[in-house]
Image (spheres, rainbow, N blue to C red):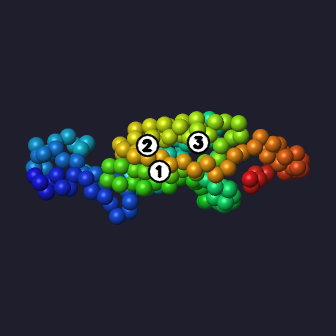
Amino acid sequence: MSDTTARNRSETSGGGKETEESTGGTGTGRKGGGDPASRGRTTIADGVVEKIAGLAARDVVGVHAMGSGFSRTFGAVRDRVPGGGKAVSRGVKAEVGEVQTALDLEIVVDYGVSIADVARAVRENVISAVERMTGLEVVEVNIAVSDVKLPDEEDEDDENAGEGDKDKPRLQ
């Protein structure tokens, strides 16, 4: 049984979470194998945790965008390329271990909001979503505020836009 216990939790080389659960039975035959739902392994890739965290962070009021100015610009271009897809994990980096994960987020906040309150709400929402969906323990969520979105930035873009450009998506 000690070799089974040693195999209960192992880390994949890809940085994801991989678990093999055992019920203590021999695993041979149909009887004594335990609950069928606990047989086998579940692997969670870093990218999965990053997407969950990115979506949870964007749900917080006061978070305008995710990522640095360069990554947002690059992402906006990539979003318009056919097949490029929308990067929901932009601005999120996850390190996934056997049973724990740590996250680094880079956010842009709206002008006028309390950065401390937004960061607290982002941490709470991200930790709740990641732990609920993955079963991993979130040990830390580091947040870097890279920019503040000013209210007049969008207004200036709208005023400078020509009538024929209103239907076209623009880079920000």
Chain-order first, disc 1 or disc 2: 1
Determine the secondary structure under disc 1: strand
Q: On the image, numbered disc 3 is attached to which residue?
A: 58
> Which of the pair 28/135 is nearer the observer?
135
Q: On the image, numbered disc 1 is attached to which residue?
A: 103
Task: State the residue at coordinates (40%, 46%).
Answer: 139
> What label sits on residue 130 in the rendered view?
2
- Distance CA(mark 3)–CA(mark 1): 15 Å
Which amino acid, mark 2?
Val
Q: Using the image, determine if residue 56 lies above or below residue 16.
A: above
Task: State the residue at coordinates (43%, 51%).
Answer: 102
> Which of the pair 103/59 is nearer the observer?
103
Task: State the residue at coordinates (20%, 56%).
Answer: 7
Proximity of marks 2 and 3: CB atoms separated by less than 8 Å: no
Residue 121 coordinates in the image, percent (x, y): 54, 36
Determine the secondary structure under disc 3: helix
Report whether 136 appears left or right of 7.
Answer: right
Chain-order first, disc 3 or disc 1: 3
- Distance CA(mark 1)–CA(mark 2): 10 Å
Q: Using the image, determine if residue 32 lies above or below residue 90.
A: above
Numbered disc in front, either 1 or 2: 1
Proximity of marks 1 and 2: CB atoms separated by less than 8 Å: yes
Which amino acid, mark 1?
Leu
